[in-house]
Amino acid sequence: MVSTIHIKTNSDKIDLDMISGYIPNSAYNKKRFAAITIRIDEPKTTALLFSSGKLVITGASSKQMAIAGIRSTMYMLQSIFPYIDIAYTNHTIQNIVCNIQICNLVTIDIKRLHKDFGTSCTYQVVSHMNLTCRPYESDVSPI
């Protein structure tokens, strides 16, 4: 699962150089990537913190686990900046990847599925051999 939030502080930008020195299990190389990578032990997730305030949590297997990763990151930031009000808004689940095993199924006709459900699926043979399905907007309920 990949989810995002936006961190609100008193300043426009977050000082990633300073923060990276205080947070254990973090890496920041602004020449390679524009965010601090923070490995969180509990729950076992990874946070990407951008100077704009965007925080991306990856590796969660549930919404509750993603929120726990957000809270853990927010706790780290609050401990670095105890006198600054830090809050977050707009928690959104961006992507969910899963795999399933269907018993007694020998093969799946991906081309036929794409033909039958083409309005909600994409199939690009050149870039990758899989069918990507997205629910209809009316089928999506707010989380």
Image: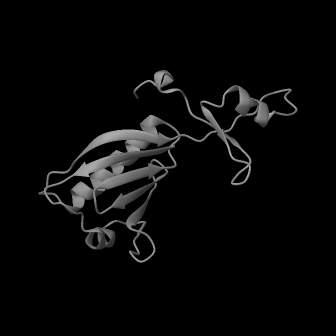
Residue 109 in the image: state x and y as whole percent: 81, 33
Residue 102 screen position, x and y as percent = 77, 29
118 sits left or right of 80 in the view? right
Residue in view at x 18 percent, y 54 percent: 9
Q: Position of residue 27 (x, y in %)?
A: 42, 70
59 is higher (above) or lower (below) than 93: below
Residue 98 figure quarter: top right
Check the image and tell me how it is coloured.
one colour
Residue at image point 67% right, 27% down: 117
Residue 47, position as x, y percentages in the image: 41, 55
* Quadrant in which the C terminus appears: top left
Q: In the figure, is residue 15 to the left or right of 59? A: left
Front residue of this view, candidates 43 and 33: 33
Given residues 129 and 56, the one toward you in this image is 129
Q: Can you say whether 16 is above or below 58 in the image? A: below
Identify the residue at horizontal 38%, vertical 65% (top origin).
35
**Residue 28, quarter of the rendered image:** bottom left
- The quadrant holding residue 31 is bottom left
39 lies left or right of 131: left
- Image vertical order of residue 81 relative to residue 3, above or below: below
Front residue of this view, candidates 64 and 137: 137
